[in-house]
Image (cartoon, helix red, strand yellow):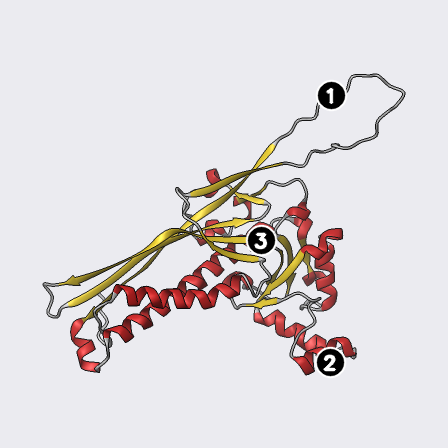
Amino acid sequence: MAIGKASDFVIYQDQFQAGVWEAITQNVNVFNGASAGAIKLVAKDLKGDFNKDTFFKTIAGLVSRRDTTSTATVADTALAQGENIGVKLNRKIGPIALTLDSLRKIGSSSEEISFGIGRMVGERKAVDMLNGALIGATAALGAQSSVLYDATADTTKTLNHTAMVSGMAKFGDQSARIKAWVMHSKPYFDLVKQAIGDKIVEVAGVTIYSGNVATFNRPTIVTDAAPLLVSGSPNTYPILGLVEGGIVVTESEQQEIATQLVTGLENLVHRIQGEFAYNLNIMGFQWDVTNGGANPNDTALGTGTNWDPVVTSYKDYAGIYLKVQ
């Protein structure tokens, strides 16, 4: 049994929860504000292992030419619904075990330790939610050739403005719907170097003097998340250009934190354990309930064929996928 000896406290439930909420409030901006709403984090209780909602599919040929010289019978056009399906990911917190003796030895307060652990939990929750969202989104979009641009086949294989334009071109006349970029720091700094190297004031000047990289007036979320690096020879880096609401993460169950005083050991021990869950929805896709199953691990979540397109046009997907070295 692994029991911490360096820090100890009697958990104050209110103090613990306060720490969680402060950290999550700070990290929510990574989802909502910084991404211009492209990655949303919301709270809503959702029952079961999946969340489902329906929408009306686009009707092909809804408006067409009318022949004023004909009285022929015209066949009805059916109205059909599609179904969006998100998947619930269940998570645990801890358990963490600490001897009561160690808090007395370091002269710390239980309130201080409780608040620190609460902040830690809140931050790790936000990281887990973001990584889960990126695993699903890169898998779903990366499996669709209609929105994938592979810049590793270009002369310049690293991220540059030409590759970004080629990626946005995948959305055609709907490219303006792309609201934010999400990328690893490596391609981000490749873009910074290219912008500085460009002898164009509007690009290089902006980079040097204001500290911004020219990303076509779209915010850029830089995160060294594992889903944004594909190890190989050489490594490749998925970059997502997302539309508003392209990814929605819903904290779908009330978080539960349990504390327990453990006796029968050489020292009294306090154990902390918790549970929470969140649902992941990717715009334009439904989770394959049959093949992907409930409560998927990262491998299943990151399998492209477990995310089935449900919209008529690829321009209604969550965004584009740009691949660089």
Q: Compute the Cα span from label 3 to label 1.
A: 37 Å
Quarter that holds the N terminus: bottom left
The image position of residue 238, as x and y in percent, is 60, 61
Q: Could you tell me the amino acid type at mark 3?
A: Gly
- Locate residue 234, reporting x and y percent: 60, 66
Number of callouts in the render?
A: 3
When asked about the image quadrant of residue 119, the answer is bottom left
Q: Residue at x 26, y 63 (%)?
A: 13
- Name the quarter where the C terminus is drawn: bottom right
Q: Nearest the camera: 108 or 265?
A: 108
Q: Secondary structure at mark 3?
A: loop
Q: Is residue 56 left or right of residue 273?
A: right
Q: Residue at x 62, y 31 (%)?
A: 80
* Furthest residue toward right: 69
Residue 31 can be seen in this image: yes
Tag shown at residue 289: none
In this view of the protein, which residue sits in the foreground, 252 or 227? 252
What amino acid type is highlighted by mark number 2? Gly
**Kind of residue indicated by mark 1:** Ala
Q: Would you name the residue on which mark 3 appears?
A: 245
* Residue that numbered label 1 is attached to: 75
Mark positioned earlier in the residue sequence (3 or 2):
2
Marks 1 and 2, Cα distance to the nearest angstrom?
Answer: 61 Å
In this image, 105 relative to 318: left or right? left
Label placed on residue 205 = 2
